[in-house]
Image: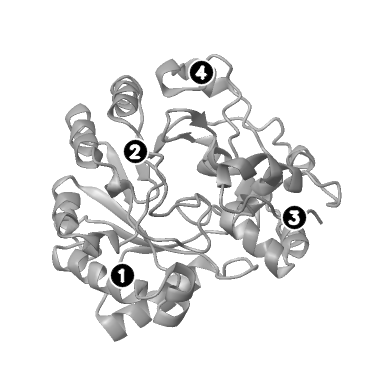
Amino acid sequence: MKSLKAQNHPLANSQYELELLESPDFRHSFEQKLTASGLFPFKPTQIEILQLNLGKMCNQVCKHCHVDAGPDRKEIMTKEIMEHCLEVISKQPIKTIDLTGGAPELNPNFRWLVTEIRKINPEIHIIVRCNLTIILANPKYHDLPEFFKDQKIEVVSSLPYFTAMKTDAQRGDGVFEKSIKALRMLNEIGYGMPQTGLLLNLVYNPSGAFLPSSQEGLEVEFKKRLGNQFGIQFNSLYTITNLPISRFLEYLLRSGNYESYMEKLIESYNPLAATNAMCRNTISVGWDGFLYDCDFNQMLELKVACGNSQHIKEWNAATLQQREIIVNQHCFGCTAGAGSSCGGSTA
C-alpha cells in the first residue's frame, strides 16, 4: 500500500488519490460493473440540477469532508463566475440550484447570487447546504434563517448523530450544541414544521468505514430522539455514504481500512442505485467555473468529458447532454447498497 503524502495540500493529492482508486488489487472495476448492468457507457438522462460550489472556506473542519474545507481555504467563486452561472440559468430549463461549499454563506456574494437567481426564475428550487453553526458564527449571519425563508430556500444540513459525543467527534467540539441552537432558530420561523412548505432536511454520514443503515429507520430514530430531547422537528433525513477521497481517504489509510472498505463498496454494488446516480441529472460547477459530473469528481479534478464545454462560460447544453460521464472506483460509494446522492438514498 502506498504511503500517504502531501496531507496538507489536498489539491496536490488528486493524482495520488486516483492512483489508489485505480489499484489492480481490486477484482472489479466500476466500468465492468456498469457493463454487466447494461449501463456502460454511462450517460446523462437530463440536466436538471446545477450544483454550485461557492468556495472551500468553512468555519468547521469536519473529519469526513471530501472537499477538505476549512477556515484556511482561500478558493472562492467570484462574482464574474456567478454571472456566467446566472446566464446559464436564464437560458436553460434548470429545475434546481444546489449551493454548496465549504460554507456557501461565507462567499461575500452569496445573498446577491440567491436574489439574482430568484429574479430570473421565482419558481426555481434553491437548496443551500448549511452547516448550521455558520448561523451562530458571527452576528452578521444571525439573520440567515430569515433570509432563507424570504427566498424560499430548502435548507440541507449535516448532523452526524443525535448525540453530542458522536457529532462533536466528527465535526468538532461544541458543534452539536450550536447545531441544536441553529435548528431551533429555523424551527421558530417555520422550517421543518408541518404545512409551512419550508423544508429542513438533515444529512447523516457514517463515522467509520461502514455503509449507512436504512435511511427510513434512521429518520424515524432521529425524529424521535431530536423531538423528545430537544423539541426539534425536520422534514427528512438523507443518508450519504462516505467516498474514499480527501479526509476520509486519509482516515481509511491511517486506520488500515482502505482495502476492506473498497471491497465492501464493490461487493455492495446495486444496479438500481447506479441507474439513479445523481451525476445523470446534475452538473457540478467548481468555485473557478470548471464543470464536473459530480462534486466528488470535482475534488479529484476530473472535468467533464467535453473538450469544448469544460467551463461555465463555454456552456453547451447539447454537448453536455451527450457526454459520457467519467467514472472511477470511487463511484462504488454512490452505488453501494441503497445508493447515495446529495439527496440521500437512490434505490
What is the x, y in percent for residue 256? 74, 67
Mark 2–mark 3 contact, CB under 8 Å?
A: no
Q: Quadrant of residue 207?
A: bottom right
Report the mark closest to the observer, 2 or 1: 1
| Gap between marks 4 and 3 measured at Cα | 32 Å
What is the x, y in percent for residue 51? 41, 38
Residue at 19% x, 36% y is 112
* Residue 127 circle label: none
The residue pinned by badge 2 equals 97
Q: Quadrant of residue 293?
A: top right
What is the x, y in percent for residue 299? 55, 42
* Residue 309 circle label: 4
The amino acid type of the residue labelled 3 equals: Ile
The residue pinned by badge 1 equals 179
Q: Residues within 10 Å of mark 3 (few under 14, many from 20)?
A: many
| Gap between marks 2 and 1 measured at Cα | 24 Å
Mark with earlier residue (2, 3): 2
* Residue 266 circle label: 3
Report the mark closest to the observer, 4 or 3: 4
The secondary element bearing badge 1 is classed as: helix
In the depicted view, which residue is nearer to us: 89 or 310? 310
| Gap between marks 1 and 4 measured at Cα | 40 Å
Report if residue 204 is visible in the image.
Answer: yes
Q: In the visual, does 67 lie left or right of 248?
A: left
Residue at 70% x, 44% y is 16
Q: In the visual, does 105 lie left or right of 295?
A: left
| Gap between marks 3 and 1 measured at Cα | 34 Å
